[in-house]
Image (cartoon, rainbow, N blue to C red):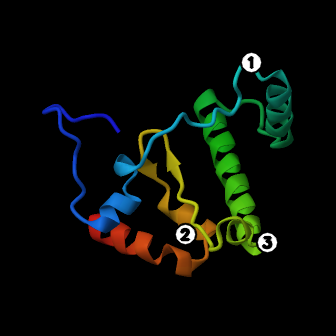
Amino acid sequence: MGKSKNGKRPTASSSLEAKWNYSFWLHVDPIVIGDCQDTEGNALRQKWIQSLEIPSGVDNFQRDDLIFNAFIHLVVSVVKESHHNRVTEKRFGRPIPFIFFIIGGYSLVEETIEANKPDILDDYMVYWNTAH
């Protein structure tokens, strides 16, 4: 995390904020979907977008919104399946929640709740409900 204007790192007001607020997380390079240099990935992405059968006549903003929503739905399905198959439990010894954000740290709370089992979101929901 970068430093604030006064040259100091910001501090969390609680352990819950430090744990669940995106601003306090270690930020690594994001995964880029549709990287221009990934020709195989781009071809698969284009094939998937075509499978959505977005009507012609839809403007670019609406088209992007439809693609984004379909992608989030796909990722929620993958997360649910990974919880069902106990993927994180097998790898890390316990279930780990998947928290949904978009660039800029905006939380997608509804999607986070939908994708995860409620009991692994207890701390996150306490933080979310007190912070918002």
* 110 with respect to 44 (left or right): left
Q: Quick check: can you spot residue 132?
A: no
- Residue type pointed to by label 3: Asn
Callout 3 touching callout 2 (CB < 8 Å): no
Observer-nearest residue: 8 or 78? 8
Choose mark 1 or mark 2, whichever is in front. Answer: 1
Is disc 2 placed on a helix, strand or loop?
Answer: helix
User: Residue 37 bears which disc, if any?
Assistant: 1
Q: Earlier in the sequence, mark 1 or mark 2?
A: 1
Q: Circle 2 is placed at which residue position?
A: 113
Callout 1 touching callout 3 (CB < 8 Å): no
Is disc 3 placed on a helix, strand or loop?
Answer: loop
Observer-nearest residue: 97 or 64? 97
Is disc 1 placed on a helix, strand or loop?
Answer: loop
Q: Earlier in the sequence, mark 3 or mark 2?
A: 3
Q: Quick check: can you spot residue 8?
A: yes
Decide: few, some or many residues near mark 1? Use Cα within 10 Å; few <14, some 14-19, many ≥20. few
Residue found 42% across the figure and 40% down from its top: 104
Residue found 73% across the figure and 70% down from its top: 90
Q: What is the distance, in whole Å, between disc 3 and disc 2 at their CAs?
A: 18 Å
Where residue 101 sits in the image (x, y, percent)? 50, 50
Observer-nearest residue: 7 or 62? 7
Q: Circle 3 is placed at which residue position?
A: 85
- Residue type pointed to by label 1: Gln
Q: Earlier in the sequence, mark 1 or mark 3?
A: 1
- Residue type pointed to by label 2: Ile
Q: What is the distance, in whole Å, between disc 1 and disc 2 at their CAs?
A: 34 Å
Where residue 100 sits in the image (x, y, percent)? 54, 55
Observer-nearest residue: 88 or 64? 88
Quarter of the image with the C terminus is bottom left
